[in-house]
Amino acid sequence: MTKIKVMTVFGTRPEAIKMAPLVLKLKDNPNFDEVTVVSAQHREMLDQVLQIFKIIPDYDFDIMKQNQTLEEITAKVMIDLAKVIKQENPDLVLVHGDTTTSFAASLASFYEQTTIGHVEAGLRTWQKYSPFPEEMNRQMTDDLADLYFAPTKLSKANLLQENHPAKNIFITGNTAIDALEQTIQQDYHHEVLDTVNPDHKIILVTMHRRENQGEPMKRVFRVMKQVVDSHPDVEIIYPVHLSPRVQEAAHEILDNDPRIHLIAPLDVVDFHNLAKRSYFIMTDSGGVQEEAPSLNKPVLVLRDTTERPEGVKAGTLKLVGTEVSKVKSAMLDLLENQASYEEMANAQNPYGDGHAAERILADILYYFSKQKGQRPIDFG
Ligand code: UD1
Ligand code: UDP
């Protein structure tokens, strides 16, 4: 039987974390010939993930530069990927989510008339600039895609609303949960925990989105500092994204407090295990919103909109934005009101069961008519 040649393309930390389970499964399966391509839109933060999952890319465009623009990323990815597609002639290009690498890779694949599969398809806020540029990146990627791997029923419904063909939409769960199942360790220790009082409550923070950079981010950091100052049993661990604008704001406001630990980005094993040991999480990240419910951690989402409303509905995420009063009262509620805390911590995870990558492989085989019998069963 001829193998299906699948080219996986990704460039940033979250794409790598969520594509890794899929890359490994594709490499292991005799029906597929897998080619890994990284744009390296991120460098250090991508390499951390590649190392953990022991993935050696076949092609590495190494495009990252300091304070890169969206136009630069788009142009470089398109030009480099077109050459590789011509050389490798894949049956399918798989992209993930909503980064500029994902969109540019989809556009290049379309220009090369290559079939495109979108992993984590169908997430929407329906607001052009929120998050920016991710909402339009994912909408445009879905416009170009042929095969859709929607993580939830709601993401499938969003795709149907845009008239994408039902027969090509598969509900798979999110591969983030597959990755999480490989990283959590019972006897985990990290050196930052040596500097935290074991009786204290840890708030784990991540914040990096373009629309939050500048004043919104600084506002939130000032609130965090006030809450730590007024609660002697609270400490913050914040692995700061390497974006220079984020680094600058975090260090300007949060430096020099013994109970606020600004550290380098963690590798994914460290991040997941520290998340498990935290009391709650504050983030504007997309992926963290999907993972935290699996770890029974409440999440305050530092954004005005979310493309992940399933978690809000389930009660595990609270959308608090970046306004001072809302962020502060949400933090105080979780720290001081045990009932509110328990309600959020014990909500069900709607995002996956750890088998998303397996489903995606079965769906690809079915699409390329190599799977005899029925259409594979959807998640949920
Ligand atoms: C990108 C994605 C965003 C995703 C985020 C995950 C786009 C437009 N944005 O945003 O959707 O949520 O990744 O983290 O695709 N940098 C380093 N080393 C690294 C990574 C970044 O130094 O390993 C610095 C560089 O100066 C770089 C800057 O961070 O220019 C910004 O990186 P970029 O990928 O453009 O934006 P992110 O905010 O990381
Ligand atoms: N993450 C990590 N190290 C960190 C912070 C986050 O490995 O220091 C992981 C996290 O578990 C999640 C992913 O990175 O899987 C989220 O990536 P990010 O927040 O950069 O991007 P987004 O999800 O917002 O696109």
Image (cartoon, rainbow, N blue to C red):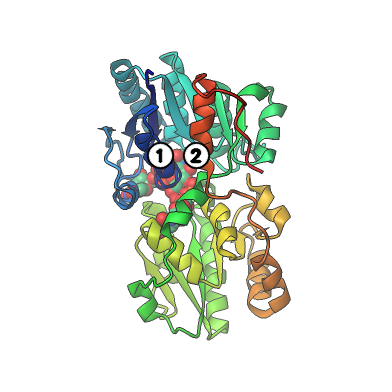
Q: Which mark is residue 358?
A: 2
CA distance separating discs 1 and 2: 7 Å
Is residue 164 at least partly visible in the picture? no
Label 1: how many residues lie within 10 Å, few (<14), some (14-19) or many (20+)? some
Is residue 287 at least partly visible in the picture? yes
Q: Which mark is residue 25?
A: 1
Q: Nearer the viewer, residue 292 or 173?
A: 173
Q: Nearer the viewer, residue 328 or 358?
A: 358
- Label 1 sits on a secondary structure element that is helix
Where residue 310 appears, x then y in whole percent?
68, 49
Which residue appears at 34% of the width and 62% of the height? 264
- The answer to whether residue 246 is left or right of residue 60 is right
Q: Amino acid at mark 1?
A: Lys
Where residue 266 appears, x then y in whole percent?
37, 60
Which residue appears at 61% of the width and 53% of the height? 303
Q: Are marks 1 and 2 in contact (CB under 8 Å)?
A: yes
Where residue 182 appears, x then y in whole percent?
43, 55
Whether 1 is drawn above or below 68: the answer is above
